[in-house]
Amino acid sequence: MKFSLQESILQCSRLTQASHSNFYPAFSFLSKERREAMIILYAYTRFTDDLVDVPEIDPSTGVLLPVSTRRKRQRLNQWCAALEAALGKIDGTVAQIDNAENSARFEKLSEQFPSCTGFVLLPAVKMIVDKFHIPIHPFFHLIDGVDADIETRRFGTFDDVADYCHQVATSVGFASLAIWGTVKPLFSDEVVHAAKATGIAFQLTNILRDMVEDFRDGRLYLPMDEITRFGLTENQFGSLLNRDTWNTEKYNKNNNKQDEFSLAERIEQMEKFEDKFDQILNKQFERCEIYYTNSAQLYQLINPQCRKVFGMMWSRYHTLFRIMKRNPKLILRNKKITLSKLQKLKLYLQWKLLPRFRLN
């Protein structure tokens, strides 16, 4: 396995292109150096996000096997250790690698982590950290966020949800801002406030869009105190997410498939749940809209040469959010909500051809 900088950049590019990210077209608005840096950063985030979900392969049969919690955590711990070896520790200790192009040093370092498949990405990651003075803590915060998803968990309050959003989204945002540049210091109050609002707005959009799929995987990212406040238990809330069961109940009622009296009671109960469910969703939509408003302020705080890349990312997420807000029932379909090719092309051309002075 080669660990030269050139090979590392190539692997990052391959991984990013293969992911078909909605962000990738926006990178075209950047200069060559910044575009390459964003590709490398995205590859790191994609690999880290996917690390715990990649199945094991039985060497004797080739059959895919589910990954145990112990093995998932083992993978993340090794990835974190490899990252520390390449970048340094989050407490400020700098990795002793004089030159990111020194492939011999990276190859020697990789011997400590023989089964860490992502190690080939790290020379490129080290390069952009050095070139753009990216603080290293966002890279480790993302690992913390992925680690939090390994075991079934619930969020007591929205503050807990916000902390999770900062780990998995705002962390990447700060690394991106270091690449783009800001008109005020990266960790000034204005930039931090707008960056955190952006992380929450984007991640809450993901949470709402993926709610059904996440619940099937045992994950629920909405605050439990709000679900309870609106009068639902977790099981009742989950019964609305299982639309196959809900639609079957309605079908059976219309076709007299079961005892009409008992079925009618269940349907009435589910409809009451649905009213409360809608109130919970409306609360999330109202909150998310406020975060989008606050996040729009970040546009003016970014280096003018790089505002378009953020603007297009923001527009894509906000458009997706507005689709869900206009028709919340789309969230409960089995089909994932995405922008159409025409919508994506329209946004791309708008940002490529038309000047923007603010987000709206």
Image (cartoon, helix red, strand yellow):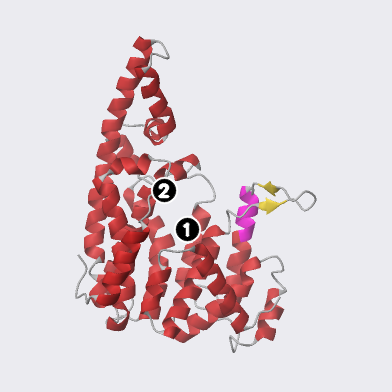
Q: What secondary structure is marked by label 2?
A: loop
Q: Which residue is mark 1?
A: 145
Closer to the camera in the image, 170 or 312 = 312
Instruction: Give the quadrant of the C terminus.
Output: bottom left
In the rendering, at what x and y percent does residue 352 appear?
30, 75
Q: Main SS type for the magenta part?
A: helix
Q: Is residue 4 located in the magenta-colored stretch of the structure? A: no
- State whether residue 96 appears in this view: no
- The residue that appears at 37% across and 52% down in the rendered structure is 161
Residue stretch in magenta: 69-75
- Is 29 left or right of 5, judged from the image as shown? left
Q: Are marks 2 and 1 in contact (CB under 8 Å)?
A: no
Q: What secondary structure is marked by label 1?
A: helix
Quadrant of the image occupied by residue 327: top left
Quadrant of the image occupied by residue 306: bottom left
- State whether residue 54 appears in this view: yes
